Image: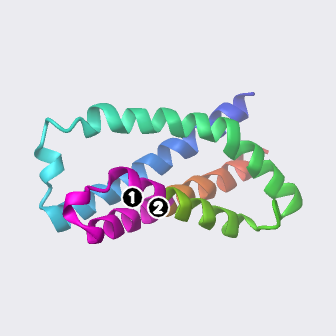
Amino acid sequence: MKNKIIKTIFPTIIGILTVLGLLIIVNLIFYKGDFLISSGNGFFKYFVPGATIIAMIIQFTLTLPFWEKFKSRKKVLGMTLIQFTGLICIIAGLALGLVFWERSLGINELIMVSLTGIIAFSVYWTSNLLTLKKLDKILK
């Protein structure tokens, strides 16, 4: 059980911190860090902790069982780990784009938010799964 807790917490934190770092860099480059100085948006106070808790629940209930299936069978639902993860990243990024799209800014906003979501999910899952792979070697 200790290994399962480690595999739940550690990859999730690494993934969240990696994406958070990426989002901060993108915001500094393109938006001059406006969300870092805006105290009213609650990003660090509400969104990051909420996303971390949700990610840990998903890690424990879905990711770890699928991880074990991929390790033993190499294919799940006819897809390899990379194909499955890519599909999940695209679907989740597009869903994120639809949820956070500000219609008044037009279709370009939808495309940019969706691309940002796809990239963020790709970075998260890449760092998460690489961390899981490393932990499997360490915790044997």
At horizontal 76% and vertical 68% (from top left) the residue drawn is 80
On whether residue 120 falls in the magenta region, the answer is yes
Tell me the quarter of the picture where residue 119 sits: bottom left
**What kind of residue is marked 1?**
Gly
On whether residue 43 falls in the magenta region, the answer is no
Element on which disc 2 rests: helix
Left or right: residue 95 versus residue 126 is left
State the image coordinates of residue 63 (x, y, percent, origin top left).
68, 46
Which of 75 and 93 lies nearest the eye of the viewer?
A: 93
**What kind of residue is marked 2?**
Leu
Range covered by the magenta-colored residues: 95-121
State the image coordinates of residue 124 (x, y, percent, origin top left).
50, 55
Which quarter of the rendered picture does the N terminus lie within? top right
| Cβ atoms under marks 2 and 1 closer than 8 Å | yes
Res 60 seen here: yes
Which of 104 and 110 lies nearest the eye of the viewer?
A: 104
Left or right: residue 42 versus residue 33 is right
Element on which disc 1 rests: helix
Q: How is the image coloured?
A: rainbow
Real-space CA distance between mark 2 and mark 1, rounded to the nearest whole angstrom: 5 Å
Left or right: residue 29 versus residue 70 is left
Which quarter of the rendered picture does the C terminus lie within? top right
As drawn, the residue found furthest toward the top would be: 1
Label 2 crowd bin: few (<14), some (14–19), many (20+), radius 10 Å: some
Which label number is shown at residue 19?
Answer: none
Tell me the quarter of the picture where residue 50 sits: top left
Q: Characterize the magenta stretch by its predominant secondary structure.
A: helix
Which label number is shown at residue 97?
Answer: 1
Which residue in the structure is indicated by mark 2?
A: 94
